[in-house]
Each structure stands twice: as structure tokens, then as C-alpha cells.
Amino acid sequence: MRIVVLAGGIGGARFLRGLKSAAPDADITVIGNTGDDIHLFGLKVCPDLDTVMYTLGGGIHEDQGWGRADETFAVKEELAAYGVGPEWFGLGDRDFATHIVRTQMIGAGYPLSAVTEALCARWQPGVRLLPMTDDRIETHVLIDDPAGQAAEGAAEGRPARKAVHFQEYWVRLRASVPAHAVVPVGADQAKPAPGVLEAIAGADVIVFPPSNPVVSIGTILAVPGVREAIADAGVPVVGLSPIVGDAPVRGMADKVLAAVGVESTAAAVARHYGSGLLDGWLVDTVDAATVDEVEAAGIRCRAVPLMMTDIEATARMAAEALKLAEEVRA
Amino acid sequence: MRIVVLAGGIGGARFLRGLKSAAPDADITVIGNTGDDIHLFGLKVCPDLDTVMYTLGGGIHEDQGWGRADETFAVKEELAAYGVGPEWFGLGDRDFATHIVRTQMIGAGYPLSAVTEALCARWQPGVRLLPMTDDRIETHVLIDDPAGQAAEGAAEGRPARKAVHFQEYWVRLRASVPAHAVVPVGADQAKPAPGVLEAIAGADVIVFPPSNPVVSIGTILAVPGVREAIADAGVPVVGLSPIVGDAPVRGMADKVLAAVGVESTAAAVARHYGSGLLDGWLVDTVDAATVDEVEAAGIRCRAVPLMMTDIEATARMAAEALKLAEEVRA
């Protein structure tokens, strides 16, 4: 069975570990979000790709969910001693090596997809990990700028706004200020990375893990051609809600959902993807009452436990997603 | 008193620490060798500048003479795990931070002289540290290439040769094979860094510390205009022999002296610099018998202890050098 998974960072990576356990013989291709990528200290950092790679390759810091296990921070301390920031992004020494290798390869002319393949040669994640694009897409978030001047013609009394890099919004500001818009800058000019459209066209099942629907899966879908390829693939597309009850299972997905006018509920996220894209949707058992609402929107829905407490629980979620896909197919 | 010192790595840096102690009120400008610079892992590494900066700034690994104290090697281990080399160049985590900052600044368009000034803002070495040039000069060493093919027209039976980067010769091969030539590639096109010629023209004394006469001081003198500026400065130029007895005090200077046809003796090195450049020369007391030979070459010479066993001994050496300069001046 050929499974294609659109993945962000921690949620996607943990789901994939469960999926590998539930479908050990499946041929899994992961299309990873690169909108979170950022240049720090002159190095190209790909947080979501690395989280998938480290998690599936056994190098992840388990409790934290991102970064490397057994990490040290000598480089970061020294950079701070030089007065070189930002200090709010926690790069450890082991992690730095990944970014050094990546940056060196990109400097030598290799596209990100080739670099990712080379890094995975070490980590052996057991999936084919593809960046969504080799082109530069940077997710920017529009926030209030109390110190700024309102644009000419702006409504009276409306504060000035500014765009910040997604990582600045997410990591430095911890999503503590309202996000007025989320813009994948460069997406209109980007092309899917080699293999992305082919993997989608050849898939038996396409899965949206409980990743962030806006800044992770939404950004992947913003790469021209990807959404259409999924809609045209003619195979079941099933997703798992990242919202349980009225809050994200982890992270701050609610903050960016508000920016795109989507309520922070499992049903609202399903409607946001829409029946033109999504065939099946899993909500948590606490949201069982919303199953009818989702099905009324033309999306087959089941309520099952959706807390990724350990690999076994996650594998059961993945198995339920594959079972739902077979129901859709039948 | 304005002192200009031409410095390589360990020997120059340790001498400078003694000079600062002997002449605490002097205004010292160091012209540092950059011919040893190398790009590793996509990062620009300046071993000699960093050795001076770390030594005078209190960050040096004292026993080793290069690299940082309290160093760790997580980045290097990880790079090796990715199969990315070379492994023979020992970059520690703290040291990596320096190269990351430098590479980022150079990528942003700053010349090496501005980068060095920025790095020194942290280390406060107590001297003005200038790279000899902002242009790229790479010292290459010509060695035998048993696996290679002799160039067409080469003398029969003469093995093929190849040029390797100085660091490959010095660090990887540990100068264990004959060096047939030492070539500062790019020197003919290089210009002295901003401030270099001005410092020389404004100096009261110019000092050649016991650095390598070929690959350190020799490379600095190979930057067009530097040798002439020193000869024309009209102030005492004094040096300290890096050779004591018939061997280098440290390092492998004898290997590269052979490549330029200079005997490994204190007197031969003085004659190599020549009376057109050098006014005074200190040899170690064990070489007292060569004083007459040096003076016969037109260079004032004294025999004093030249082992930099500690800062006090080094300060006495520096004081002797300054005293010799005053004798020359008078």
C-alpha cells in the first residue's frame, strides 16, 4: 500500500511513527512543510523536516518533541557571547551539525530535496521524506505593530500592522498576540519538489495527520498543483483532527485558525478542508457529537480516541484512519 | 610607542602576550597571516587570527596552543555521523561559533578586516588585530603524488607532484612528506587590508616574532606592498629566531624552510629575511656562536634566552627585542 502523508512538525512526526507501526509494510511518502524554514546565523534551518527525520530516525528529544536527544548548547552560548542572535530559537550543538551540512550542500548547488535525501541516508527514517518544494516559501504572520505607523488610508483608530516570520510569531512571541493573517510568502511562484506530484498521483491513500491545518498542511496545500493533485488522485483522503474538545491537542493551532476565520473545533477544521478535498475525518471521542455535523458536510466521520499518548495509541489512530479510508473506497 | 607585529599562530600569539606584559602602554598593531585560512563545512576558518584573538583574549586552550579552552566536540561528531569531513581538522563546538559568526558576516558582505574587528569586540585582545589582506590567499604546498602521473616533459624518474592546502600538509599529513614548494596562491592579486600599510608607516618599531618564517611571516611579506612598506618605514625592524639549536622551538618550520632552500638554523633564517628588511635579530643563547655570522650579514644580533616557557620569560624576550630596536635606532 502506498500512503502519502502531508506533515508538519511534532504532530505529524509522532503520527508517522504510529503509522509505520500500524502499516509496517506500507510504502510511505511524507510531504513535509517547509514554510517554517528560517535562516539563522547564516544557516538554513528546516524545523519540520528535521522533526520528522529525527523522530523517525531515533534522534529526537522525546519529551520536547523537537530537537536532538542528549543535546548541548555550547555553540548557542558562544553566539550569544558574540552578541549574535536571535537567542529565542533553541539550536543545540548536534542540531547545528544538521544545519551546517544542509547549508553547505545548498551552497554547493543541491536543491533541498537532494539535501533532505542525503540527510535521511544517515537517519533512515523508514519513509521517503520530500520537502513540499525546493523553492523558498516563508510563512509570515501579520500582527499588530503598536510602535508602527498605520498605513495611509487605514481605518481610523486601527493600529499599524507588520508581518513577522512564522518562527518569530510562534517561538519568540509564543502566539501570544492576535494573528490577523497567515501568508505563505513565495507560494504563488513555487513548484512542488521532484516526486511530490508523482507520489500523490500514485498513492492508494492520502492522509492529513493531526498537524496544524493552517501553517503546516495549509502551507503544503498552498504550493500550486498540490491541492489539485490530491483532489484529482481519485483515492481516499482522510484526516485526523488536531483539535480535541475546543483546543489543539498540542501547540497553538487555535491562534492561527482564528487568523483564517476558522473556529477551533474538530468539525470546523474538517469543513475548512472541505469535501472537495477530504473524504474522511476522525474526531476524538469527546467530539462524538460533531460526527453528524461533519457528515452533513459530505465528509465521512468517525469518533475514536485521538490522543497520541504512546506509539501503541498512535498506531491505533493510524489504523483507524486506514480503516476509514477503506470505508470511503468501498 | 607604536609597535607593529607580523604574526602567525601559536608562536606569534604567545610572543604577543609577552610583549603586552613588557610594554603595557604600547599601541600594538598585529598583522595576522591569513594564508592558512580554509573553508571547512562551508565555514570560513582563520586559524592564525583566531589563535591570536583567543590567546590574548583569554579563551585559548593553553596546553594545546590553539582552539578554545573547555571545548566540546558534539558538532564534529555529528558531522562525522553524516559522513561529512574532513575529520582531521579539530573544530570544537565553541570554535564553531566563531566560524559561524564570521561566515555569516562575510556572507552579508563585510570584509574580513571588519569581521575580525567585530569578533575582537568580544575578545578585547588589547591589540589591534588586522588580517594581512581582505583578499583570498591560500598557501598551497607542493608534495609528491605517488598515485599521480608525472607531467609531460618532467625529468625521467621524477615522481608526479600535487599541490595541497597548507592545512592538509600541516595538520593531516603532519609535514611528514617533503615539501617541494610553498605557494601563497592569490598573493599576486591581493591588496593589504585597510590599515596595514598605515600601521607600518606609522610604527616606531616593527617586530617579527618567532613565527614560521615561510608560511606565516613569509606569507604576510608576500602581500604586495607589505615588504616594501616595512623596508621603507625607516624604523627598526627586529626579529626573534624560531629556530633554537638546529630545530624549530615548536611546530615543523624546518620542513617548509627546506622547501625554500633555507637551512634550519637561526643564522640562516636571519639571512633569509636579509639586511634589506631586518635590522636586528635575537638568537637563543645556545646559538651564541652564530651571532658573528648574522652580524657579518649586516644584521645586529644578540643571544638571549628564547624559550617562551611562561609569560615572564616571554616578556623578557620581548623586552630584549625592544632593547635591540633602540640599539639599532641609536
Image (tube, coloured by chain):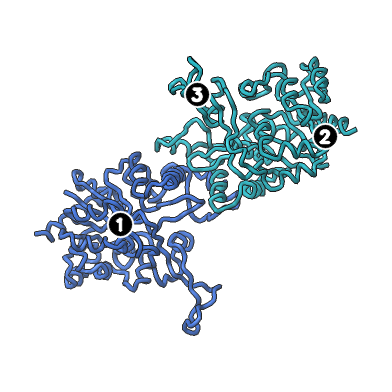
Chain colours: A blue, B cyan
Residue at image mark 1: A192
Front disc: 2 or 3: 3
Residue at image mark 2: B236
Q: Residue at left 20%, top 60%? A: A238
Residue situated furthest right in the rendering: B330
Q: Are marks 2 and 3 on the same chain?
A: yes
What secondary structure is found at the residue carrying circle 2?
Answer: loop
What percent of the width, then of the height, locates residue A115?
Answer: 37, 46
Q: Is residue B70 visible?
A: no
Residue situated furthest left in the rendering: A330
What percent of the width, then of the height, locates residue A30?
Answer: 28, 51
Dot 2 alpha-carbon crowd within 10 angstroms: few under 14, some 14 to 19, many 20 or more: many
* C-alpha span from label 2 to label 1: 67 Å
What secondary structure is found at the residue carrying circle 3?
Answer: strand
Residue situated furthest front in the rendering: B153
What percent of the width, then of the height, locates residue A280?
Answer: 18, 63
Front disc: 3 or 1: 3
What residue type is disc 3 on?
Answer: Arg
- As displayed, is residue A111 above or below residue B223? below
What residue type is disc 2 on?
Answer: Pro
Left or right side of A311 for B284 = right
What secondary structure is found at the residue carrying circle 1?
Answer: loop
**Residue B182 picture quarter:** top right
Left or right side of A173 for A5 = left
State the mark number for residue A319.
none
- Residue contact at pointers 2 and 3, CB within 8 angstroms: no
Residue at image mark 3: B161
Dot 3 alpha-carbon crowd within 10 angstroms: few under 14, some 14 to 19, many 20 or more: some
